[in-house]
Image: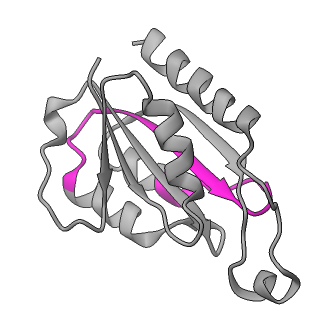
């Protein structure tokens, strides 16, 4: 199954590391939402949306991208990295894709090195993350998504 994963990954590239692990050996196109290129997501069997967590939610560019390009009724999965794990990070993104009558197949989140805002003052949190175990768990998550399709 051909899959697109639309993402935003800055600062330390944590999200992109996770996505590259998922995509390894798979039929996956990674689409940077800041590339300003029009995309045709209708061509994909499933679409992932991925981001680091900014102020408790997905980066706005990813949410807006879904609103603009996600076709009605598409199967979707969500991926995120964050400095610390909390509930609710995917709520705004889930609302955006549900507005397109999309079915959310699952979500994967893991911690990633974070020096955003006040964390910079203390040298950051979650140093060394995502770990090899996190990347392997990401691969397993993606494998379960495509196995269920």
Q: Residue furthest right?
A: 122
Q: Quadrant of the C terminus?
A: top left
Magenta span of residues: 69-93
Query: Total label count?
Result: 0
Q: Residue at x 29, y 68 (%)?
A: 34
- Above or below, 25 against 82 in this view is above
Left or right of 16: which side holds 118?
right
Asked if residue 13 is among those painted magenta in the image, a careful observer would answer: no
Q: Can I make out residue 126 in this image?
A: yes
Picture coordinates of residue 66 (x, y %)?
31, 55
On the image, which quarter does residue 124 sit in?
Answer: bottom right
The image quadrant that residue 140 belongs to is: top right
**Quadrant occupied by the N terminus:** top left
Q: Position of residue 147 (x, y in %)?
A: 47, 10
Asked if residue 99 lies left or right of residue 126, the reply is: left
Residue 47 vertical position relative to residue 25 in the rendered view, above or below: below
Q: Position of residue 76 (x, y in %)?
A: 40, 35
The image quarter in which residue 24 lies: top left
| Residue at (49% x, 21% y) in the render | 145
Res. 78 visible in picture: no
Identify the residue shown where x is 47% and y is 40%: 20
Is 72 magenta? The answer is yes
Q: Does 26 sit left or right of 94 as displayed?
A: left
Between residues 103 and 107, which one lies in front from this camera angle?
Answer: 107
Give the image's coloring scheme.
Answer: one colour
Residue drawn at x 52%, y 60% as measured from the top left = 92
Return the x and y of residue 14 as percentages of the image width and height.
Answer: 60, 56
């Amino acid at each position: 199954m051909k899959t697109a994963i639309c993402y935003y990954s800055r600062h330390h590239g944590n999200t992109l590391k996770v996505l590259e692990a998922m995509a390894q050996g798979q039929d996956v196109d990674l689409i940077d939402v800041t590339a300003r290129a029009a995309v045709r997501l209708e061509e994909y069997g499933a679409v992932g949306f991925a981001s680091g967590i900014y102020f408790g939610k997905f980066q706005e560019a990813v949410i807006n991208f879904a609103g603009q390009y996600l076709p009605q009724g598409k199967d979707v999965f969500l991926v995120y990295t964050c400095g610390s794990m909390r509930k609710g990070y995917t709520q705004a993104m889930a609302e955006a894709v549900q507005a397109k009558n999309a079915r959310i197949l699952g979500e994967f989140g893991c911690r990633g090195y974070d020096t955003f805002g006040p964390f910079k003052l203390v040298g950051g949190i979650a140093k060394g993350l995502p770990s090899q175990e996190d990347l392997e768990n990401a691969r397993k998550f993606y494998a379960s998504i495509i196995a269920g399709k």
